[in-house]
Amino acid sequence: MFGLAYGDALGAPTEFLSMAQIGQRFGGLGPERPEGDPALVTDDTQMAIAVGLALLDALADPPLTADRVEPLWRRRFVEWLDSPDNTRAPGNTCLTACRRLAAPVPWTEATQPGSKGCGANMRVAPVGLAPGLTDETRAAASQLQAAMTHGHPTGLAASELTAFAVRWLADGLAPADLPGALRDRCHEQRTTYHGDWLGDLWRASGSGDPWRFVSRGWEECLDAVDRLEEALARPDRAADPCEATGAGWVAEEALATGLLCFLLFPDEPVAAIRRGAASSGDSDSIACLAGAFAGAHLGMDAWPAEWAARIEYAGDLARIGGAWD
């Protein structure tokens, strides 16, 4: 959780800047540390905390089901929408969907079915961290939290892969084995539709049936894993990672480029999030994901100790992380 926030804070001032502008302002390696006291984060961390706090409440009364957790996520998302701190340039998809959740209307009507923006998976790390879930429940919950705002099947698949990457790394999977594990997951799940959790979301896509709906998302994520493996076959730590795996504005690119930054520096977490921040795309989301992967792999002690006292929302991050570490 802290790694996610550190990456977010590091990437926030470089979002929307070109590589030349980043180099002029921060040097070729990007920002060295989160600045400020507190070091401010973006909507990426705010919404990850919303997902995490709602999960804590839901898991206090197990088992985790869609009926149990959806109202809690709805409440936290609407609280985020109305918060005076919601001033960090959030995406239009999240804003529009959350306004409709507040109306309230059923989430399947509130969601934006054509959007696969990275808002679907930038906030899903807590679902990966939550203990005691079966793979099926973790997958379905990952997809539901995405689907409540981003109804595109690629947003759902990328969110599931992000959550599983966090879980596998926390459980000790070697980083080098991660792309292969993600590829296997894509193949295994490409026709799995979690109807008990997603309801009739698939109908909004015009796909004809739920299996065609979900397979599109897994195919796009497989393409992203292909690009990730091609980049890792010719690793270039000095290059803009967005040139290899995409700018990260959409879910599968955010996943691939966040993973690329992490896998280029698997044992150097600060270097990983600096690489994400020094990128031409959605730098805060890319560095946010890279930080989540690095933190899951290496733990809290891998980060500079003084950052924890300055990062915004440190209390919430510690509450979520401490409950599940």
Image: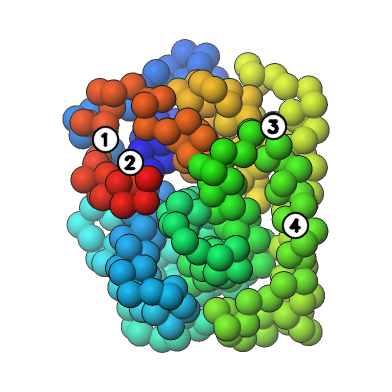
Which of the two marks, 1 or 4, is nearer to us in this view?
Answer: 4
Residue 41 tag number: 2
The image shows residue 215 at horizontal and vertical percentages of: 77, 68
User: Residue under circle 3?
Assistant: 176
Q: Is residue 238 above or below residue 44?
A: above
Left or right of 315: which side holds 295? right
Q: Which of marks 2 and 1 is nearer the N terminus?
A: 2
Image quarter where the C terminus lies is top left
Image height of 177 relative to 142, above or below = above
Tell me which residue sits at (48%, 67%) in the image: 145
Q: Which of 315 and 30 is in front in this view?
A: 315
Q: Determine the residue positioned at 52% across, 14% down.
A: 28
User: Is disc 3 placed on a helix, strand or loop?
Assistant: helix
Crowding near the residue tagged with mark 1, few <14, some 14–19, many ≥20 C-alpha atoms within 10 Å: many
Q: Residue 282 — which label?
A: none
Q: Residues within 10 Å of mark 4 (few under 14, many from 20)?
A: many
State the SS at label 2. loop
